[in-house]
Image (tube, grey):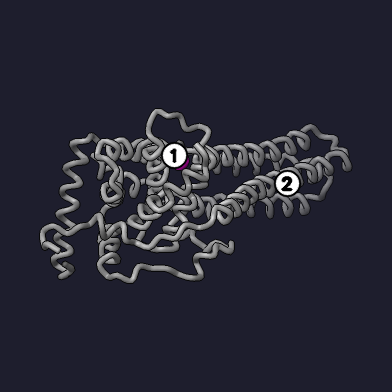
Amino acid sequence: MEFEQVYKTYWDRIFRLCMGFVNDYDIAQDLAQETFIIVWQKLDTFRNESSIGTWIFRIASNNCLRQIEKDKRFPKSDLPIHLSEEKQTSIEPQIQFLYKCIAELPETERIIISLELEDVRQAEIAKIVGLSEANVRVKIHRIKEKLTQKFKENGQQ
Amino acid sequence: MDNNNIDFKALWKKQTVSQPNIEDLMARLKQFKKAAIRSLWITNVLLLATSAFILFVWYYYQPQFISTKIGIIITILAMVIYLFTYNKLLGKYKNIETTQTNNEYLRNLILIKKKQQFLQTKIMTFYFIALTTGICLYMYEYASRMTLLGVSLTYGLTLLWMMFNWFYIRPKQIKKQQTKINELITKFEDINAQLE
C-alpha cells in the first residue's frame, strides 16, 4: 500500500479521532501528524492480518493515550506548518459542543465513541481497543446515552 | 432534530479538517529524524570526550600505581554503564509496539514504566558508588606525594562534595523521578481499568 494513498484516505478520520480525544485543534493536528510519521515508519511491517484501517486506528489511539505523558511537552513546532496560521475551528456550536463532551469522557470511551462515529464496525472497534464485541456494544450504548443527556441539559437540540 | 435521537454521526463529520500537504509532513519527518540523530551524537560525543580526557591524563602523566589505573577504569566504566542502560531503556520505551490493541499497549506501557522506576534507582546508586570509588582510587597516587594537610584537604573536599551529592542531590533526584513515574503509572493503570 502506498503511503500517500493511505495518508489521503485516512487523514480526516485520524484527525477527528485525535480531535475527539483532546478537543484542541493544534494538538490534534500534531497528534495526527505523529500518527502518520509512525505509519510511514511502519508501513513495510504491515501484513494483511488485519485491515489497514484497524492497523492505523490502533496506532492513532495508542498515540493519543501516549500523549497523556507528554501533556506539557508541546512547544509549538517551530516548523512552518501553513495551517496553524489560518486557524480553523468549527463555528457551529453544536459541533463544538459534541467534541467538548467527548473530550471530557474517560480516555478509552473517547476512543470507542470516536471510532463508532467514524462508522468503524463494532467488531473492528473491539479489535482496536482490545475488548469483546459485546462489551463494545454495551459501552457504545452507554456513551451515547451520556452524550444525549449532556445535549439535553445544555439545551442543544 | 428529535430530542432523543440526535444525529451524532452527522455532527461529528462536520468538524472542519484541513489536511496538510504531504510535503509538510515529509519536512517534519526529516526534522524528526535529524533530532533523533543529534541527541544520539550529543550523548556519545560527551562520553567520548570525557573518556579521551581521562585517557590523555593516563598517557601524559604516566601513573605508577595500580590504584590510579583501576580508578580510571572504574570511573569510565561507571559512565559507560550509566549511559548505556539509560539509552537502552529509552530506546525500549520509544519502540513499544504501537500496532497492538489499546489494552495490550497500556499494559506494556505500565510494565516498562515499572521497570524504569526500578532501574533508575539502582543505576543511579551504582553510578554514585562507582564514581566515588574510582575518583578516590585515582587520587591516591597524587595524594601520596602531598603533605598531610594537602591530603586531608584534597580528600576532605572531594568526599564532602560526594557526600553532598549522595545525601542531598541523589535522594532529591530519585524522589523527583519516582513521583513523576508513579503518577504516570497510576494514570495508565486507571485508564486500563476502564477497559476491564
| Residue situated in front as seen by the camera: A129 or B12 | B12
B152 relative to A3 in the view: left or right: right
Nearer to us: label 1 or label 2: 1
| Residue situated in front as seen by the camera: B1 or A87 | B1
Q: Label 2, secondary structure: give it.
A: helix
Residue B186 horizontal/vertical position (percent): 33, 48
| Label 1 chain ID | B
Residue type marked 1: Thr
Q: Which residue is mark 2?
A: B45
Contact flag, marks 1 and 2 (Cβ < 8 Å) = no
- Which residue does the image show at 49% across and 44% down from the upper left? A5
The quadrant of the rendering that contains the N terminus of chain B is bottom left
Residue A128, by quadrant, is top left
| Label 2 chain ID | B
Q: Label 1, secondary structure: give it.
A: loop
Residue A143 horizontal/vertical position (percent): 19, 51
Examine the structure image and report whether residue B57 is included in the region drawn in magenta. no
Residue B52 horizontal/vertical position (percent): 79, 43
Can residue A90 be seen in this snapshot?
A: yes
Q: Tell me if residue A113 comes above or below residue A22 in the rendering.
A: above
Residue A93 horizontal/vertical position (percent): 27, 70
Region in magenta: B112-117
Magenta: main secondary structure equals helix
Q: Which residue is mark 1?
A: B98
Give the mark nearer the N terminus: 1 vs 2. Answer: 2
Residue type marked 2: Val
- Which residue does the image show at 33% across and 56% down from the upper left? A20
Whether callout 1 and callout 2 share a subunit is answered yes
Examine the structure image and report whether residue B113 is included in the region drawn in magenta. yes
